[in-house]
Image (cartoon, grey):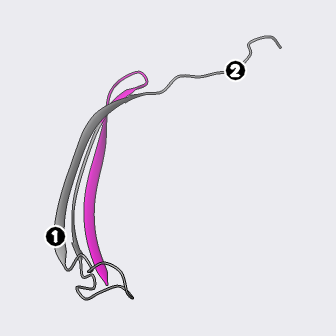
Amino acid sequence: PTMRVALGLEAPLGKGLAIFASGGFGVFALQEGALGQCILGAGSTQMFAGRIGFSYAFEVGGGGG
């Protein structure tokens, strides 16, 4: 079983330019025992991730009508 929660936002800075940020937390409950006749499982773990960045939107198209 896995549970993940995330939140993000985006804010415009100008014509076609925006800044965005997101963050999240996850809990992974994995098997600890042997997987068949192979290696041991990873067990349970927690994860936090964050991102921040910029985006720019532009139009692509022909202007020849």
Residue 12 horizontal/vertical position (percent) = 33, 32
Q: Which residues are magenta?
A: 1-19
Residue 15 horizontal/vertical position (percent) = 41, 21
Q: Which residue is mark 1?
A: 46
Question: Which quadrant would residue 36 be assigned to in this image?
Answer: bottom left
Q: Nearer the viewer, residue 18 or 29?
A: 29
Q: Which residue is mark 2?
A: 61
The quadrant of the image that shows the C terminus is top right
Residue type (three-letter) at the residue carrying disc 2: Gly
For disc 2, the neighbor class at 10 Å (few under 14, some 14 to 19, many from 20) is: few
Question: Which quadrant would residue 45 be assigned to in this image?
Answer: bottom left
Q: Nearer the viewer, residue 47 or 55?
A: 47
Q: Give the residue furthest to the top.
A: 64
Residue type (three-letter) at the residue carrying disc 1: Gln
Task: Please tell me whether residue 48 belongs to the stretch shown in magenta.
Answer: no
- Which residue is at 53% across, 22% downward? 58
Q: Give the residue furthest to the front.
A: 37
- When the figure is inspected, residue 55 is found, relative to residue 27, above or below; the finding is above
Assign a secondary structure to mark 2: loop
Task: Please tell me whether residue 4 belongs to the stretch shown in magenta.
Answer: yes
- When the figure is inspected, residue 36 is found, relative to residue 24, above or below; the finding is below
Residue 38 horizontal/vertical position (percent) = 35, 81
C-alpha span from label 1 to label 2: 45 Å
Q: Earlier in the sequence, mark 1 or mark 2?
A: 1
Q: Which secondary structure class fits the magenta region best?
A: strand
For disc 1, the neighbor class at 10 Å (few under 14, some 14 to 19, many from 20) is: few
